[in-house]
Amino acid sequence: MLMLRRKLWLTVGILLAVGIASAVPASAAQPGPVSSVAVNWTPQLATSGTDGSVEIVRQLVPCGANMYAVGKFTQIKRFSTVYNRNNAFSFNATTGVVTSWDPNVNGTVNSVALTADCSVAYLGGLFTNVHGTTVKNITAVSTATGAVIPGFGSSAGGQVSALLRSGGHLLVGGYFSSINNSARKYMASLNLTTGADDGYVNLNISGNYVYTDEQGRPNKPNASRVYNFTLSPDGTKLLAMGVFTSVGGVGRRQIFMLDLGPTSATVNPWYSTEFDVNCMPVQPFWLQDASWAPDMSKIYIATTGYKPARGPAYYTFNPRSGLCDVTAAYPTTPGLVRNLWINHTGCDSLYSTAADANTVYIGGHHRWVDNTFGCDRKGTGATDSPGMSGLDPTTGKIKAGFNPTKGRGLGATDMLVTDAGLWIASDNQANVNQCAGSFNHSGICFLPY
C-alpha cells in the first residue's frame, strides 16, 4: 500500500494547504458516544468525483438554526433536488433543508465564522470574487442576501486558512504576509465591523521546518503559516496549528496554546518537546488538528506524517513510535507535558478530531487503529476502523461497542461535536459517500446523540 500512499500525498496536498477552525467548543451536555447510525436528511455534494475532480466540504459551523458549510464545490444535493452553490452554502441543522443563502464564491473557502447574532458570515480562503464583488481571500457577507458587506476590509496578501470569532475579535490564520493594510503575518485579529487589525494578536510568528531523514533526504518546502484553530470549551484558550518555530518570542513547533485575555492574546506555557520531532520529508507539517476534552483536562491531537524521519520506526518492519499518523492525548497543565497515550493508525493520515466526555472522535484516511505493530499493513492487535473511529479518552484504545466507520476518500477534513451530535465534513473522491453504515453522505455526515 505504500505506492497508494505516495499517490495520495499528491492529492491530499489539497487538504494540507488549508486549515479548518473548530469554532464551536465541544459539548459538555452529552456524555457520548454518538449513534453508530447516520441520519438520512443531511445534504451532500452533488458531484461524484469519479472524473478525478474532487470536491470537499472543509468546515461546518452552526449559528442559530442553521449550519454553514464551506469548501470547494459547485453543487449540493438533498434527496433528488440539486442546488448550484459555489464553495459556500447553509442548511437547517435539524432538518437538512438547504437555505437560499448563496454568496457565490469564485474560489476555495477554507473557513467561516459568524457574528453572535448570525447576521454576518466571515469567509476566508483563496478567492477573488464574492457575490459579484472583487475581494481578496477574506470578506464579510450578509447571511440574508449573501452580498459583501461594505466597509469591511477584504484583502489578505495570501491564503486565509482559519477564521474564528472570539468575543469582539475575528481571529485569522493563514499564509498571508499582510492583511487589510496591516503588515501582520500569519495570524491577526480584526475588528468585526471594519476588518482593521485591532492589535489583539501580536505574536511575531516566524520559522519553518528544515531537516533530513534517515537517508539524508531533505524535507519539502513548507511556508510559515497558521493552519488551524480550536477554541477551548470555556472560550478562554485557543490552540493554533501550523508551520512556525517561534511564537511570541518562545520556541514552538506544530502547535501552540494562547490565553485569550481581555486586552491581548498571549502564549501559554503549555507545550511538549514531542512536537519537535520530525516526520517524513514529504510531510514536514504533520499536526493537523486538536480537540479539547469537555472538562478541559486533556487535549487530543490528530496527525499525518507517515513515519518518523529518523530512528527505529523509520523502518516499516519495526513497531511504531512517535507522533506521525497518530491520535495522542496530553494533559492541559501549563508548562512542559508528555503524552498520556498514543494510538497509531499504522502509517495512515488523520486530519480531524473532536471529543465528548466519553469518546475521542478521529477522522482521516486511515484503515486501522490500535496498530502499533503495522505500517501500511494490519499488525497484531489492530482493529479495522476505516475513515472515522472512536477512542476511549482514558486508555486511547478503540471505544468498546462503537466502530461506525466511514468511506475513506481523501479523508474527513473537519469534525464538530454539538449538543445534538457529531458532524463530519469530508470529500467525494471516487464517489465515496458511505458513513456509519449508510450511503448518500458525500461531504457531510451527522451522527446524533
Image: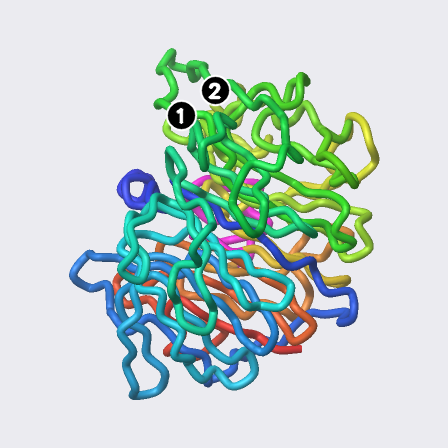
**Horizontal relation, residue 301 to residue 268: left or right:** left
- Where is residue 144 shown, x and y percent of the image? 46, 73
- Of 213 and 400, which appears nearest the observer? 213
Considering the image in quadrants, where does the C terminus appear?
bottom right
Residue 150, compared with residue 253, is above or below; it is below
Considering the image in quadrants, where does the N terminus appear?
top left
Whether tag 1 and tag 2 are in contact, CB under 8 A, the answer is: yes
In the rendering, which numbered label is found on residue 209? 2
Magenta span: 363-383
| Residue type (three-letter) at the residue carrying disc 2 | Tyr
**Horizontal relation, residue 330 to residue 377: left or right:** right
Residue 82, compared with residue 302, is above or below; it is below
Q: Quadrant of residue 30?
A: bottom right
Instruction: Answer whether residue 77 is magenta in the image.
Output: no
Element type at mark 1: loop
Q: Quadrant of residue 32?
A: bottom right
Type of secondary structure dominating the magenta stretch: loop
